[in-house]
Amino acid sequence: MGRKRFKDFKMTHIEKHLKSSDFITDIVIGMSDGLTVPFALAAGLSGAVSSNNIVITAGIAEIVAGCIAMGLGGYLAGKTELEHYQSELKREFAEVENIPEKEIEEVKEIFAEYGIDEDGQTLLAVQLSKNKSKWVDFMMKFELGLEQPNPNRARNSALTIGLSYFVGGLLPLMAYFFTSTPHNGLLVSSIITTICLFFFGYFKSKITGQSPFKGALKVTSIGLIAAAAAYFVAIGFNFLSRIY
Amino acid sequence: MGRKRFKDFKMTHIEKHLKSSDFITDIVIGMSDGLTVPFALAAGLSGAVSSNNIVITAGIAEIVAGCIAMGLGGYLAGKTELEHYQSELKREFAEVENIPEKEIEEVKEIFAEYGIDEDGQTLLAVQLSKNKSKWVDFMMKFELGLEQPNPNRARNSALTIGLSYFVGGLLPLMAYFFTSTPHNGLLVSSIITTICLFFFGYFKSKITGQSPFKGALKVTSIGLIAAAAAYFVAIGFNFLSRIY
């Protein structure tokens, strides 16, 4: 294998690592929803009310609610992940301590699946069982598929998701501050948000290793479809409630 | 180990399996946000507008927007996961084909980490490399930590998350249909939603193996905090916009 080829493989490995960056994942989670839902809500209301103030009030209420729900949600999800990991870790230690023969069987089963023969299985199981802490690590990862979560992840996750949602949500709403009717607000907001969604989708896809243009189109479509649906449903509901 | 003990361990294994059920995870994702955000938005608007119709219109627009954003978001996330798996699978096949000596080194490194000696590492690497398809499966799981996603996951996920959000969002909003002022609507909505959040949090925690009461309190607090924050921010904004 030539040097260039090796460099490619190395970069691929770095890329793989980047793909799972928690920080970027959190920004993407917060920003995707932040750019989409408040925008669509504002669009929906623009078809049904006559005052920018109501659109902005609803938009701000939504952003605050979404921020807290997503941020606190992210915090608790992170905490739960950590607690879950720790309780499983404790359980695996107990199993290795109390029923080692069953755990050895489990190790063997894992390797049997990949075509390792009886001798190989036994050799591995014996060597693994010499160091209980490594044995438990092995079971955590390969039997249960769990990796040790970062203990600060919960708090960081909450802040990042919440803040990203906030920033993402304010962008579409800004248009209603500087226009006089919901109709004009919607027009400006749609232009701002379409551009933001496109760039966001582009970079998100680039970072996660997907095709950037395809990704940008996907993200933009979701935002516009959500806004169009909210708009027509709100107009429809408003129309019906005036008749009855 | 007695029979009872063994049964406990077996049930634990079933429970572990249930914990990662995609279907339940999707319901929880959709329902958590659905019960929280539309409720908080409606609460926020109740403090700032005088007509139930506006609260309901905004609530419906939000539910539609959230449904589509989360559902389509879930769909695309599932698709991306599948594409990611397939492209990594192709890459691993190419690596095993073109640079087997490097992949053998990687296998050895993986086992070295768990205290397997040089002889054991070589034995495993040789046996694994006999069956390329199993070797690739092994690298996918043990090097990259990737498991084959269910190909229908994307579509199912979209439907489940979207629908759960819809159901979760309509519950708090119903109160505004049957009351005459936003103030009364908020009162009834808060009672309905607090009960729903509590039960939802209780069952969610039970299913995911957390303490049910603690979980119920957590979920209920997030919803009420989000609603209270949205309410006060909306009142504050409305107050300021009347002065200026």
Image (cartoon, coloured by chain):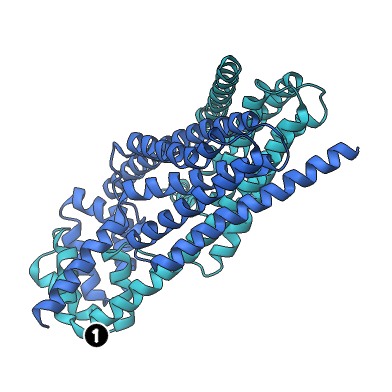
Chain colours: A cyan, B blue
Chain letter for the residue marked with disc 1 in the picture: A
**Could you say where residue A18 lies in the image, as x and y percent from the top left?**
51, 52
Residue A65 is left or right of residue A112, and the answer is right
Q: Residue at x 45, y 42 (%)?
A: B168
Which one is nearer the viewer's eye here, A146 or A131? Answer: A146
Residue B13 shows in the view: yes
Helix, strand or loop for disc 1: helix
Residue type (three-letter) at the residue carrying disc 1: Glu
Report the residue that reaches farthest toward the top: A243
**Could you say where residue A28 lies in the image, as x and y percent from the top left?**
56, 45
Where is the C terminus of chain B found, in terms of image quarters?
top right
Which one is nearer the viewer's eye here, A132 or B60? Answer: B60
Query: Which residue is label 1 attached to?
Result: A97
Residue A47 lies in quadrant = top right
**Could you say where residue A232 lies in the image, as x and y percent from the top left?**
56, 19
Residue A28 shows in the view: no
How many numbered badges does the structure rendering display? Answer: 1
**Could you say where residue A208 lies in the image, as x and y percent from the top left?**
50, 43
Report the residue that reaches farthest toward the right: B244
Q: Is residue B172 above or below residue A188?
A: below
Where is the N terminus of chain B found, in terms of image quarters?
bottom left
Which one is nearer the viewer's eye here, A140 or A161? Answer: A161
Q: Is residue B12 above or below residue A237?
A: below
Question: Badge 1: how crowded within 10 Å, few (<14), some, or many (20+)?
Answer: few
